[in-house]
Amino acid sequence: MLDICLLGTGGMMPLPKRYLTSMMARYNGSSILIDCGEGTQIAMKEVGWSPKPIDVMLFTHYHADHISGLPGLLLGMGNAERTEPLTMVGPRGLEKVVNSLRVIAPELPFEIRFIELSGPAQDLQLCGLDIHAFRVNHNVTCYGYSIYVPRAGKFDPVAAKEKEIPVRCWNLLQKGQVVEMDGVTYTPDMVMGPKRRGIKVTYCTDTRPTNSIIESAKESDLFICEGMYGEPEKQKKAKEYKHMTFYEAADLAKKAQVKEMWLTHFSPSMPDGRRYMKDVRKIFPQAHLGRDGRMAELDFAED
């Protein structure tokens, strides 16, 4: 199961009931944070989630509304007596940016490891998850991310019996381990069927529509996408500042054939986007307006 929470849905500046951009995913005891806008630490406390188990932070880019909450969050993690290493991923220049922000958080009881992205796309394996970073089209270098929970094939007990594999090896083989017993080597492919469909979540913000988004979000269970403007008359402004409208995001969701879309990263000039959703759903019926604290529990599809 993959737990998702939108912590902040605001762009540019926070509003009284809207923190700046961040999203958190929890899987198998670890947490992954995407972006860390102002208010992220408070937003976590409001939903009852903790920063201590965050093992990975993914940054789309380094505009202030996406990273200004980081120093306080790091101090909070340090005060929670965290000692495990923290991995940070983001566009080139990540280490320099983070170290500059750490002027007010110079001493932490844990190591920070940096992975700086380059090129149009990059694949990573972190916390048992497959993470695909893909470049989008903003006025600075910016990436979106797909998080994928892989799922092994079905265990075939009939095949295991036919091949006379000891029962005490079965559990290890199901976990993908190679087992050697009594001079015989047993491998998972001897008893496991083809891989099954896992769980996929794609997140992108601060961008114009791109083919890279459609390709990377393809058949996602949940697509979290920027909708900076709901007002149709702000199409020109969206193009000028390299952002998206609700309707462009819905078109991407339709083309990518995702199951569900949440809009996020709203302009502070648009305090309420609900009035635009009827027209958005004409393009993509499973579109929803994101809100701070919105959660989802995603599980594997039934076979």
Image (cartoon, helix red, strand yellow):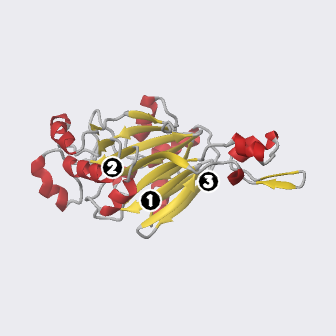
Judged from the image, the secondary structure of the residue bearing numbered disc 2 is: loop
Of badges 1 and 2, the one in the foreground is 2
Q: Nearer the viewer, residue 252 or 209?
A: 252
- The amino acid pointed to by label 1 is Ala
- Badge 1 element: strand
Position in image of residue 45 (x %, y %) = 45, 31
Question: Is 27 drawn above or below residue 181 in the view shown?
Answer: above
Q: Is residue 115 visible?
A: yes
State the image coordinates of residue 19 (x, y, percent, origin top left).
Answer: 33, 39
Residue in the picture at 85% in, 54% down: 184
Q: Check contact, mark 3 vs mark 2: CB within 8 A.
A: no
Q: Measure how far apart labels 3 and 1 are at the Cα level.
A: 23 Å
Residue shown at 28%/37% (left/top)? 288
**Between residues 259 and 41, which one lies in front from this camera angle?**
259
Report which residue position mark 1 lands on.
133
Q: Residue at x 59, y 49 (%)?
A: 128
Crowd rating for badge 3 (residues with CA inside 10 Å; few <14, some 14–19, many 20+): few
Quarter where residue 269 is shown: top left
How packed mark 2 is, by other alpha carbons closer than 10 Å (few <14, some 14-19, many 20 or more), is some
Residue at the disc numbered 2? 257
The answer to whether any part of residue 272 appears in the image is: no
Q: Which residue is mark 3?
A: 111
Farthest residue, direction bottom: 119
